[in-house]
Structures are given as C-alpha cells and as structure tokens.
Amino acid sequence: MEDVYSQAEELVFDHLHAAAFQYSPLGRTIIGPAANVKAITKKHLETYIKDHYTAPRMVIAAAGNVKHEDIVNQVKKHFTKLSTYPTTIAQLVEFEPAIFTGSEVRIIDDDVPLAHLAVAFSGASWTDPDSVALMVMQSMLGSWNKSAGGGKHMGSELAQRVGIDDIAENMMAINTNYKDTGLFGVYATCKSDCLDDLAFAIMYEMSKLSHRVSEADVTRARNQLKSTLLLHIDGTSPVAEDIGHQLLTYGRRIPFAELMARIDAVDASTVKRVANRFIFDKEVAIAAKGPIQKLPDYNWFRRRTYMNRY
C-alpha cells in the first residue's frame, strides 16, 4: 500500500476515479483505506472468496500446444470446490451503478518538483458500440515523453504541441473501460509554470475531435492501434489472458479479424459523432497533485469542452 501511494501517477488516478464516480464502487480504491487493511481477518478473506470467486463469474482459458479435452478433464478434477453463489457482475452493477459526476480533486504539494494532472470525460463500457472508436481516438491523441524516439515529430497533434512548446515532461491519452461505463481523457506531468499552457493544449485537442478531424489522422491512428494490438497479443500467455478477458466482458471470443474490421470501420465522421457524444459540452473530472496553484479552475475546463463557431 505504501509502495502504491508513493507513486504520484497511481494516486492521481485513484483520486480521478473518486471524483468521477462518487459514492460508487468505482470511486473506491482497490486497496482500500489503511484502517480496512489493518482490520482484515481470516474470516473476511474467506467470506470475500466465497462471495466473489464463484463459478458463474470465472473463466478458465488456455492457449498453445494444448488439447481441449485435456483442459476440460483437468478443470473437472481440480476445480471442484468453487462456490456457486449466483450473484453476477450485472446484478452488482445494477445494485450500485457508477454514475459520472463532473468534479475535481486538487492536492497542493510544493515539495515535489512536478505537477501531475489527469482530465477525463465519461467513457464507454466494454460492450458499448462506440468503445472501438474511443480506442482509435486514444491513439489519435497519443502519448509522448522527453525520452521518446520520435521527439517532436510524433503523429499526434497533441504530442507535437507538447513537444515543440516544451510544456510537459510526459503525457498520454487514457481510455479505461468498465462493465457499465468508462473514462476517456489525458494524463500528464509538467513543471508548475507550464500548467496553463498544458491545460489549454489538452482541452483544445480533445474538444477539436468533435468538429475538425482529418481522414489522414484517423488512418494513422487506426494503423497504430492495430500494430499495438498485434504486439500486445504475442505469445500463449497473452492470448490466454485475452480469451479470458473477452469472455468475461463480451461473453464470447472476438476473432482478431472481426476486431480489425471494427477498427477499420472507424472514419472521421465516426470520430466526430463519438466525440460529440462523450466530449462536446459534457462534464469533466479533474485530479491534480503537486505544485498546482497555476492550474486553471474547474469552470475554465468546463468552458473548453466546446467551441463557439460562427
């Protein structure tokens, strides 16, 4: 727990979720408060495993030089004492839905050299038809840091702006999906006197997705996304993990060809439509930590979720 909270990035993302999904499970940290950790007993662990590590909520996946029949026999032999507690994820979500709230968390700490900033909108669930388009949009915004090989010549216009103007140490677009919602935005670190310019660059590039997108930029993002996915799912362990993940989130295995086709179907008009759904004139969640006195106020961010054009 001390190790996790010593990392500013992890702490900022925890606060981002706490601000965005108030009074819901997604707004609570995975580890939990120190008092809970210290009070955990054997009984707590047994109850948790009984309630959550259940057969209806478990997937067993294998990849590589394996035979289906052998895996089935091993499962029948070793997985005989699983709880059959019937509560499903869908029921848990229905009982405590995650409702996005536009708000902010600011932790001023002048003892650290860099400011950490996360700005996010309500995103899509795993099964949302627009989840793939958000993946492409994440690739359009891209990522950058001072040690990146591409330097100031990245494909992303946000990365170019950040690199050329030297207004951040690093930045990356974030797109996190959950059962019934998600988060889409940007995380970055910078020096305190760059906060104003960095905030403007982030909000300008995100809001621009709803009205000014080129087919060339979308094509670049699609190709980059497909390349990243191909590299990620390389080897039997990642394939098995991907199978399990897809069965839990989609209820079936999505063939790679189908996923590539979904990505190829995203064009400039799709990006504009999805950006209008999730970004244009929508509430925003903000989490910041460090020397952040020069970070613009919440209303400044909210006004830049749209552009008035005449």
Image: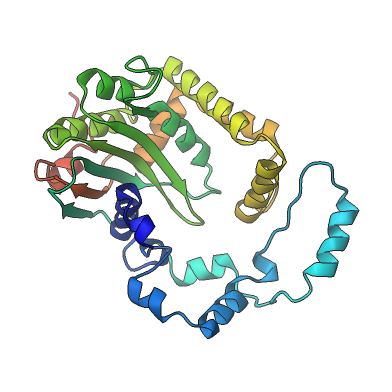
Q: Compare residues 298 and 169 and report the one nearer the observer.
A: 169
Point 37% across, 57% down: residue = 3
Please say whether residue 117 is visible from this viewpoint. yes
Quadrant of the snapshot with the C terminus: top left
Quadrant in the picture for residue 58: bottom right
Quadrant in the picture for residue 59: bottom right
Q: Is residue 86 left or right of residue 201?
A: right
Point 38% across, 67% down: residue = 24
**Placement of 145 over or under 120, stated as above or below:** above
Q: Compare residues 73 and 99 and report the one nearer the observer.
A: 73
**Placement of 39 over or under 157, stated as above or below:** below
Q: Where residue 214 appears, x then y in whole percent?
A: 39, 18
Q: Is residue 60 left or right of residue 113?
A: right
Point 42% across, 32% down: residue = 137
Q: Where residue 264 appears, x then y in whole percent?
A: 57, 25
**Placement of 102 over or under 120, stated as above or below:** below
Quadrant of the snapshot with the N terminus: bottom left
Q: Where residue 237 appears, x then y in whole percent?
A: 68, 44
